[in-house]
Amino acid sequence: MKKKAVKKPRPKIKRTKTKHVPVMLKEVLKYLQPKSGKIFVDATLGMGGHSKELAKKVGKGKLISLDQDELTLRETQQNFNGTRESVIFVCDNFRNIGQVLRNLEYDKVDGILFDLGISSWQLEHHDRGFSFMEEGPLDMRMSRDGSLKAEDIVNSYSQKDISLILKKYGEEKNASRISRAIVRERDKRPILTTTQLADVIKATTYGYRKIHPATQTFQALRIAVNHELEALTMALSQAVDHLKPGGRVAVISFHSLEDRIVKETFKRFALKCICPPDFPHCVCGETAILDVVTKKPVIATKTEIKTNPRARSAKLRVAEKLQ
């Protein structure tokens, strides 16, 4: 009688947490020019890389650090030491930056930083549903207070609406094909996990090289779930209103949709006249509110990209308040 083969347990794979490296830190400090006694805002705290350095620079001043993700905020606060007394942590969406500052009685500040996108900490926690590298629920909410989840869009939106989201927020060329595949799959069974969705998308492609075919779809869903572009538009206008004359706002974006909003917002506030171009002279009386410091977006150096691949797609734009 043959002995039953004993299945050996699979060895546990040790996963190393990605070391958080703030993108373009030197450039951020160079352009924002934080100094002791000044008041600054980090509108996207994340893992605190930028905030820690800004806090050191403001010294006896104040740094107001926001993050809408309560879990990220809690984690970062625990690892924040040394300069913590100069930092005010606030759990809120940066779309409410004006109200946050009014509540804290800081009507005008010297500088504001937005480091957009998603943090490595959020990607590593698969129960948040941001990554398709390992199985997790199709959630993608930055804040657990949000009612809309990615699974709601995938399983209940029409094929047309899903396709529009993928085109608008992910700039996905195969949006129609992917949305059809999603609807076909959900008719058989609900799509509830990240890997399940990634497999559906992967099946619509005929091979790929560097970028996984689900990348743009996941980006689009995340943006739609969190209303990220609408929040950015609202936040930038409020940020300009709450800057002191000479104060600066710096924005690091990671894809063209965000960068376009930043570029157009800065351009609008930098206009000296809004009269029609065929008018012989200005009658609107408008004056520029911002001076665009970076005429072209600043990109990361080759050295930084080599050590921090996340910086590859980053673009930094900076503007200064004139009045």
Image (spheres, helix red, strand yellow):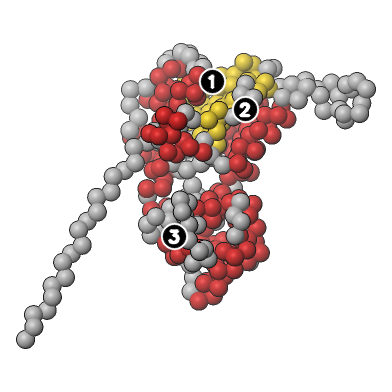
Q: Amino acid at mark 3?
A: Thr
Q: Horizontally, is 300 left or right of 237 in the view?
A: left
Q: Nearer the viewer, mark 2 or mark 1?
A: 2
Q: In this figure, which residue is indicated by the disc labeled 1?
A: 31
133 or 95, nearer to the observer: 133
Q: What residue is at 44 percent from the left and 39 percent from the top?
A: 310
Q: Amino acid at mark 1?
A: Tyr
SS at mark 1 in the image: helix
Q: In this figure, which residue is indicated by the disc labeled 3?
A: 194
Cα separation, mark 3 vs mark 1, equals 39 Å
Q: Amino acid at mark 2?
A: Lys
Q: Earlier in the sequence, mark 3 or mark 2?
A: 3
Q: Do tag 2 and tag 1 residues touch (Cβ < 8 Å)?
A: no
How far across and how far down the image is residue 125, in percent?
A: 37, 49
Quadrant for the N terminus, please.
bottom left
90 or 268, nearer to the observer: 268
Q: Nearer the viewer, mark 3 or mark 2?
A: 2
Q: What residue is at 55 percent from the left and 69 percent from the top?
A: 181
How far across and how far down the image is residue 105, in percent?
A: 56, 24
Cα separation, mark 3 vs mark 2, equals 37 Å
